[in-house]
Amino acid sequence: MMENKKVWFITGASKGLGLVLVKKLLNQGYQVAATSRTIKSLTDEVSKASKSFLPLEVQLTDNSSTKNAIERCIAHFGKVDVVVNNAGYGQIGALEELTDEEARRNFDVNVFGSLNVIRNVMPYLRIQRSGHIYNISSAGGYYGGFAGWGIYCASKFAMAGFTESLVEEIKEFGVTATVVYPGYFRTDFLSNNSVMTPNHAISDYTEVRESEKTHLNNVNGKQPNDPEKAADVLIAISQEDQPPIHLLLGNDAYDMLKVKVDMITKEAEQWKNYTLSTAF
């Protein structure tokens, strides 16, 4: 019965994983509030507003706009159970060549937009004494060894960090949270209208230019992971009483974790004498 289904609130839902998740949830009888920068992008891809679907035009970097969207979700469905902070975009560019404006904008959307959602949805989840929050990070949120992706990876590392703290803060209310680390999924993440490139590229950064070229021309459209299967996993995990704090999605994400763990372990042992020499 629909009344037994959880209500989902999903940001960045007009394309990519967010859109796949919205469609799959609606097909399974869930109720979904979905956000995008324009209503038309949602109604064109999904449908007009109904008893089960609420499209919302939201500027996530605007706290009042975000607050209003959550209030409308509660007014429409009576509650919210699962929150998916999915909105975000990729920013390519060496740290030197990206302007302060380019770097801050990436953090505004990827980090502060998610914080706006959390800040405004938690009062309802605290009262309910239930709920689950997904923060969609990236495999680049725990392994940042990609030339030209420093700002993007930093924003996704930030999501991982505040999710770990969030878990400790909200557990007394019966609310849970998971940071999700997707690898390369076959969405439009790397398309020209999604990923951003530097306004003032510096040609000396040959590895950055090669990484940019590879991602835009060779990786885009050939990613190894299926977003339909990722959506299935998110739905399944939402039904767990004790969901994971960290969730990797994709073989490549799993492989990158092993690389990072091995690298840190090796360096920790190599420089162990210096590490332990600081004690009184």
Image: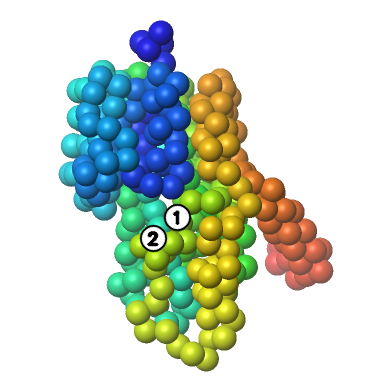
Tell me if label 1 and label 2 are in contact, CB under 8 Å: yes
Q: Horizontal and vertical percent for residue 63?
A: 22, 47
Please indicate whether residue 162 sits to the left or right of residue 141 in the image: left
Q: Which residue is mark 2?
A: 194
Could you say which is closer to the camera, residue 2 or residue 58?
2
Could you say which is closer to the camera, residue 211 or residue 167?
211
Residue located 34% across and 56% down the image:
109
CA gap between label 1 and label 2 equals 7 Å
Q: Hey, which quadrant is residue 117 in on the image?
A: top left
Q: Hey, which quadrant is residue 278 in on the image?
A: bottom right
Residue located 44% across and 38% down the image:
20
Q: Horizontal and vertical percent for residue 129?
A: 40, 19
Secondary structure beneath dot 2 equals loop
Q: Identity of the amino acid at label 1?
A: Asp
Nearer the N terminus, badge 1 or badge 2?
Answer: 1
Indicate the quadrant containing the N terminus: top left, top right, bottom left or bottom right: top left
Residue at the farthest top position? 1
Residue located 57% across and 86% down the image:
206
Residue 69 vs 260, above or below: the answer is: above
Q: Identity of the amino acid at label 2?
A: Ser
Please indicate whether residue 110 sits to the left or right of residue 209 in the image: left
Q: Which residue is mark 1?
A: 188
Q: Horizontal and vertical percent for residue 51?
A: 25, 19
Indicate the quadrant containing the C terminus: top left, top right, bottom left or bottom right: bottom right
Q: Horizontal and vertical percent for residue 266?
A: 80, 63
